[in-house]
Amino acid sequence: MSAPTTKNEKEQNELKYVEERGIKIKNEVANIPSERSKLHNPKMAICREMTLLTLMVAVKDSKIKLGCLEGVSSSGLAALQWKKMLKDKIDVTAATLDCLDSINVNCKNNYIHPIPFPLDFTRTPGITLPQQGEKEIHVCQARTNVLLHMEAFDFIFLDPHKSCTSYIDSVFVNLRHLGILCLIVPDISMFARSHQVVERMYSAAVIKTDYIKELAARVILGKLARSASQCNKGLEVLYTQSVDDFLLLCVKVHRGPHIADASNQNLRSVLHCRMCEERVILEKQKAPVENPYLLLPCTCNKEKIGKTAVVLGPIWAGPIFKPDFLVKMKNSSESLNLDKKSLSVLNAILDEVEDSIETRAENSECNEEEVVDKDTKCDQNTKQTENESVTNKNLESYTTKDNREHNGGTQNLKRPLDDNENSNSPTKRPKRVDLKNKSEKELWDHHFIPFYYNTHRWKMDAAKKLPKLAELIQLLKSDGFRASRTHFDSKCIRTDASLKQIAQTLKSHCNVYH
Ligand SMILES: [Zn+2]
C-alpha cells in the first residue's frame, strides 16, 4: 500500500515544482481561473529566454548598473533567471500584488536572498536603490502601476495575465532614457475576433485581415508610442516576436520632446482593400485625400460596386526590427546556450530582416525614380544585381558595426561610462538625445517592408500548382523584388511586390494566376 502513495506523492511533487533554465519554482495548484492564469506557462519560456537575451545585450552595451523590474511577477521566475545569469551586473526587483510567500520560497529554493522593498512615498523616483549583492533581489508587494509611478527603472519586463493596456500609461512615466521595455501581449486572436474591444483598449480600428498578427503588433506599438510621447519620450522598436497567440514587443525609449514629436510621425493609418487584401500606409497629413482608392495598387473599386476599402489604425508605421540589435542578440545567444525553439525563431527573424530591409540610400533612390516615372517603379530587373548585393551587405555592415562597438569604438547611442559606479551618490544618467545628431535621425531609417500576403488564398489553375513558398520567393527575387518568409505566419510571404506584380511573376514563370 505504501508504494503507490509514495509514487503519487512523487508525481504531485513533480507537478508542484517546475525547472526552467536552472531555476526551480513552485507551481501552485490552482482551482479558479484567476489563479490558473498565474501558473507556470511553458509556452512563455521562449519569451523569457528572449527577454534574458535582450537584457544581456543591454548590460553589455551599458556601463552603468541597470535597475531591472519584473512587473507582474507571480513566481519571480524571470527575475531569478536574470539574477542567476547576470549576478551583480544588475539590480533586480520582482513586484507582485499577491502575498510574497511564493516568491520568497522560490528565492530560497534557488539560493537567492529576497530583500523586502517596501514602497516609500517620500522617495523621489530615480534615486539609487539600496545596494544589492550577487545573490540578492528586491521583492515588492505593490500594485505594478503604483510601483511604476514611484520608482525609475532601466529595464522593465511585463507579462500581464490579461490585458496589457492598464500598464501602458504608467510604464513610461519613469522608464529611464535609453531604458528598455519588454512587453508580452496575450490573446492576439482577439484582434481578429472583437474589433470593438480593440477600439476600446487601443483606440484603433481593425478588421480581420491576412496580416492580422503584424497589424496587431503595430496597433499596440502605436498605443505605446502615443503613451510614451505623453511623457515626452520617443520610441525605437528593437524587435517584435510572435509566438502562438502571444506577442513579445521590445522597445527602447529616448527622452526629449523633439524625439517624441519625431516618433509620433510614425503613427499612420492603413488603407485596406476588403476585396483583395491589398493595402497601403497613408501619408501623415491633415487634409483629406481626394480619391483614396487611387492610392491602392488594385482596381477593385472600379470593378465592384460600393465602398471596397476601409481605413485601419492608427498603427506604428516605423520599423519593427532593429537589425544591429538582433545581430548582437544572435552573438550573445551562443554564450546563453539558447533553446532550439528560441534559436530557430531568432534565426527566422534575422532571415526576414535581411531580405526585407531597405537602407536609406536605396529608398531615396527608389523615391527619385518614382518621381521620374511612377509606372516604371518596379522595373527592377536591371537593378537586380545591385539590389541583391546591397541586401546581402546589410547584415554584414551591421555585424561590422557590432564588432566595432565590442572593440571599444564610440557610438552615439551607447551609454556613457560611469565613473562613480561604486559610490553612493546618485548615478549619472545618459544625456538627452539631440535630433540634430545624425545617428538619432537614423533611428527609424531602416525601412522595412510592412505586412505580408497569405499565399494560401490564391486561386490556382486546375492544371498547375502554386509553387512552394521558397520557390515563389526565388521567383520574385529573380524578377527584382524583395521577398522573404515571415515568422508571423508560415503560410505568408513578405514582399515589396503588389498582388498584381506577384500575379505577373507567377504568370510568366509557371502559368499560375491569382
Ligand atoms: Zn483590391
Image (tube, rainbow, N blue to C red):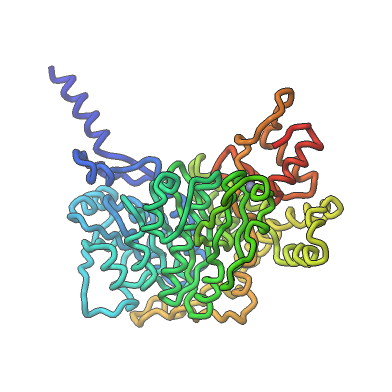
Asked whether residue 134 is in view, the answer is no
Looking at the image, residue 509 lies above or below residue 49: above
Residue 136: x and y, percent?
29, 61
Asked whether residue 455 is in view, the answer is yes
Residue found 81% across the figure and 37% down from its top:
508
Judging depth in this view, the residue of 355 and 75 nearest the camera is 355
Looking at the image, residue 224 lies above or below residue 496: below
- Looking at this view, name the residue that lies furthest to the left: 1
In the rendered structure, the answer to whether residue 399 lies left or right of residue 432 reads right
- Looking at this view, name the residue that lies furthest to the right: 382
Residue found 51% across the figure and 40% down from its top:
340
Judging depth in this view, the residue of 437 and 406 nearest the camera is 437
Residue 439: x and y, percent?
62, 74
Residue 444, image quadrant: bottom right
* Number of numbered discs: 0
Looking at the image, residue 132 lies above or below residue 42: below
Residue 3, image quadrant: top left
Residue 205: x and y, percent?
46, 56
- The image quadrant where one finds the C terminus is top right
Judging depth in this view, the residue of 36 and 52 nearest the camera is 36
Residue found 63% across the figure and 49% down from its top:
278
Residue found 51% across the figure and 56% down from its top:
312
- Looking at this view, name the residue that lies furthest to the front: 305
- The image quadrant where one finds the N terminus is top left
In the rendered structure, the answer to whether residue 380 lies left or right of residue 315 reads right
Judging depth in this view, the residue of 339 and 109 nearest the camera is 339
Residue 389: x and y, percent?
79, 54
In the rendered structure, the answer to whether residue 14 lies left or right of residue 159 reads left
